[in-house]
Amino acid sequence: MSNNTTNHKDAFDQGITCFRAQKYEDALRYLTKAIAVGGAEDATIYDSRAAVYEKLGRTKDALLDSKQVIKISPERWQGYARSARLFSSIRKYDPAVKMIALALERVASREKNRRVELETLRSEIEADQAIYLERQRRHASKTFYHFGRLPIELASVIFSDVVNSTPAQVIGLSHVCRDWRRVVLEMPSLWFHLTLSSRNPGAKARAWKERSGGRLKSLSLHGENPRAMYALEVLNDIAFHHLRSLSLTSVDWRTFRQTLPLLSNDIIRQLETIWVNQTTWMPGVERFFELPDLQIRNLSLVTTDLNWRSLSDNCEHLSTFSYHGSFHPEYLLDLFALLHHNAQLERLHLNMTMNGLTMFSPGQERRKPLPEIFSILPNLAELSLEGPELIPESLIAVMAPSRLQVLHLTKCPGPLDEALIHLLTREQPPHLRELVIDRCVIRDAQILVQFLNDAPSLKVLRLMHLYNIKPVLDALSEPVKDSSTPIPRVLLPHLEKLDLSYCPEVRDGPVMRVVKLRIPPQTQEWDQPIVETQNDNTVPPSVQPSQLASLALHGCEISGEVLPWLRKHVPKVEYKYATKKQANWKR
């Protein structure tokens, strides 16, 4: 017995020596030998081997030895303390807290240092537990299947909102998971919008017909693909009583009507949205608008030919009208009649190209302005014009612009001076928030300055491909001193987005002055700027304008040294050199 005691003590001492030398494998071998040759009832040997297992990352074995320590000497704190530390390392915090409490119960009150160590260990365990629980909570909130707890009625509302804004999303929703697919397939209202193009039009038509119960509200057809036209035959027995929107691209109208015999004139009259894109002539499309009392509210046409007389006679409920195509001067009165009949029109987009003769033949006097026998478009909020020179002037001359907020004028060959004057002289001028003038002619820039002066609510200004805009830049960069008040005013105080792309008079100095005037006082720099701005254009804080959020200067003569300064004071600066050669030289 004495020999075994000596042997296991020698093995234990050798194990401790190896442990202190960080030779953990050797320490494990000696301590295991010590247990085998007589130390099976020695709690210290098991506790030491548990420490070795802990260093080797063998947590399970370390816990087994700590359990043995507690079994042999339940009155000692060491086994409980090590168990607490081991449980904490594998994120089993509840057993760890329990073990540290048992360890503290077994430490004498006079061992203050030991109690402090164990209290510190308990605090660390509780802190780790709190962090772990918070991570678990966040992970659960991200991965928890909240949709499964939603009432089916609420899920239906969510899906309907998504599909109504983007009808194609119905396919994505049905592919998320089984639950979503079941709900989506059981909701006919999600399948009311059908688009037939080159991608499996026949199978798609059959699926939508079945899932919608034959109650299509929107039909979009791309007729340039013959398969899409053939797929229409799947729908030839649908009554279309619920159809409200129709979109046709390169569709032969006669073939379309013959394929869908149940698409009656009464159903066509009740359509609210029509989008027609006929870049090449298609027979029968001109007869579309010959039906009386059409209920169209949103009409978009891209076509080579249009019966303006029929359109003006039969459409009186438009709120949005967009036309992109050819136009002959003889249709002008019909166009004005159409606008006169649609007093509730809110958005008007006209992109016209001349068909046949030009608006004015060489040497011919300008056609006299149309008489102001009526004031049209009293509710118009958005106007976009592109095309013949007579349109902007004549249309603006007879319109009531009091509610106009967005005005786009693009590629109008004739001068815009008279059109702007018409807007200025109205009793109720427009309250513009956005103005775009692109590739147009303005002879007197002061008229544009005066127009901007009467648009204090303007937030977006885009002047592109324009000459003679230096007076505009000067007005934007200098406070306006009015004799009626001692406090200077700033032109366009709420301006947020400015685009001066491809204007040849835009240079470093004018642009910097415009930006500097709108820098908040707290960020003003009092050091010398890169380019001398000549004038002190500071304003009192009470009239400080809004800071620019966006500035576009594509194709302008802006030096590379100024761009960093601009980007520092404007959150978004867009600049593209006019040519590659110029870009290389600037850099």
Image: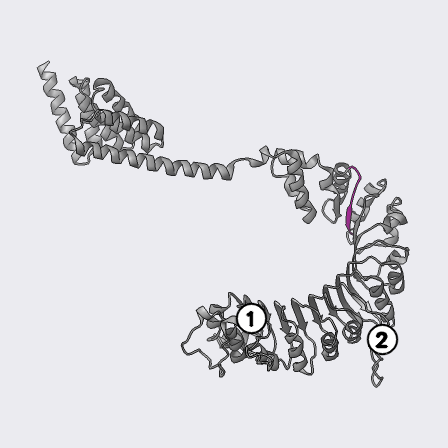
Identify the image quadrant of the N terminus: top left
**Residue with the mark numbered 1:** 576
The part of the image, by quadrant, that contains residue 344 is bottom right
Residue 447 in the image, given as x and y percentages of width and height: 68, 80
Query: Which of the two discs, 2 and 1, labels the residue nearer the N terminus?
Result: 2
Q: Is residue 288 above or below residue 106?
A: below
Task: Tell me which segment is drawn in magenta.
Answer: 213-222
**Residue with the mark numbered 2:** 370
Q: Residue at x 16, y 36 (%)?
A: 21
Q: Is residue 162 above or below residue 187?
A: below
Q: Is residue 434 above or below residue 586?
A: above
Q: Is residue 215 magenta?
A: yes
**Which type of secondary structure does the marked residue at label 2 adopt?**
loop
Q: Is residue 369 left or right of residue 111?
A: right
Q: Is residue 446 left or right of residue 538?
A: right
Residue 291 in the image, given as x and y percentages of width and height: 90, 55
Q: Is residue 585 left or right of residue 247?
A: left
Q: Is residue 375 magenta?
A: no
Q: Residue at x 29, y 26 (%)?
A: 99
Q: Is residue 15 above or below residue 321?
A: above
Q: Amino acid at mark 2?
A: Leu
Q: Amino acid at mark 1?
A: Lys
The part of the image, by quadrant, that contains residue 81 is top left
Disc 2 vs disc 1: Cβ atoms closer than 8 Å?
no
Q: Would you call the spot at circle 2 few (<14 residues within 10 Å), some (14-19), or many (20 or more)?
A: few
Residue 122 in the image, given as x and y percentages of width and height: 28, 33
Q: Is residue 542 left or right of residue 297?
A: left
